Image (cartoon, rainbow, N blue to C red):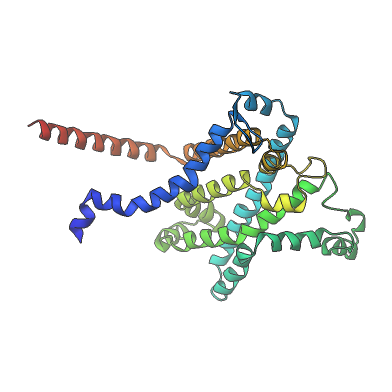
Amino acid sequence: MSGVLRDKKAYAVFLLPALLFYLFSVFYPIEESIRLSFMKWGGLGPKKFVGLRNYIKLFKDSVFYTAFFNNLVYLVIVVAMQLLIGLLFAVLLTYLTRGVTLIKTLYYVPCIITTVAVTQLFRSMYATQPEGIINKLLRVVGLGSLATSWLTNVKTVLACVSIPEGWRYTGMYMVIFYAALISLDPEVTEAARMDGANAWQLLTRIKLPMIREVLLLTLTMVLTGALRGFDIPFILTNGGPGNVSELMSTYMYKKAFGSNQFGYGSAIAVFIILESMLVVGILNYIFTTDEDREERENMRRQRRARREKRRAGGRA
């Protein structure tokens, strides 16, 4: 068995099915979107090559800029809810000794609820006819003047379509953070506590730096997910009223499948892909320390030395 695992051909055999599936399900659609972004096509008939015309149109489109800045607000709300609240709940869970499994299960339940059910839940909460629970609570506590039609008010609609997405996956990130925190070596935290560190110092100077890789992973997942946010905002408001809650993904869908401008919609899709890749690159740069860079450089030197040694052996 060990001989099979050392055989590079065995690696190829095991990896080939997954690699083929990934190529056809991820890379091929991306390649088609890039190719189609240079075309003018309405869904039927021949495609017409238009060069960079779709991208020029993109950067002259005022609705696209509105969708872009809406996406930034959407991103901030989703990140704040999923990561900050998820981390807070995870830290609180580490201090509990009973009922942890039940609490984790209850907070994780929204992740497995279908998108339509989540959307309908929040639509009923935001409703005015019949009055939803949010407006009812405001009247009960004497803040009835703040009651409004949440999904048609231009000042509140963008936050209202962002909150359901943030709420939905908060429990998932809570579970991830909790698993990372309880896996830390207790001797490290105990030593810091004996040196006089309080709970806040333990969290910010000991625990969080030790789960830096988990923080990078979750932040990458949240940011790329928020940049691709589509289903809940689309079902709740369809980008309305006007374009106040329009996101880049909903605008792309409308242009491609609503207006049959598949070339222009593909250009928006390519922009979203590039934006996501840029975000991932920036996060990796920020979270990579000098020690990590030095370690990677040492690994590259070792690989280079091994290749040169093999070449020298082949020539001999």
Q: Is residue 316 left or right of residue 269?
A: left
Above or below — where is 280 with respect to 125? above
Q: Position of residue 111 (x, y in %)?
A: 61, 62
Q: Position of residue 49 (x, y in %)?
A: 58, 25
Q: Quadrant of residue 125?
A: bottom right
Q: Quadrant of the N terminus?
A: bottom left
Q: Residue furthest left?
A: 316
Q: Quadrant of residue 105?
A: bottom right
The residue lying at 71 percent from left, 32 percent from top is 65
Q: Nearer the viewer, residue 39 or 202?
A: 39
The residue lying at 55 percent from left, 48 percent from top is 219
The residue lying at 57 percent from left, 68 percent from top is 104
Q: How many marks?
A: 0
Above or below — where is 245 with respect to 128? above
Q: Is residue 39 left or right of residue 17?
A: right
Q: Is residue 14 left or right of residue 289?
A: left
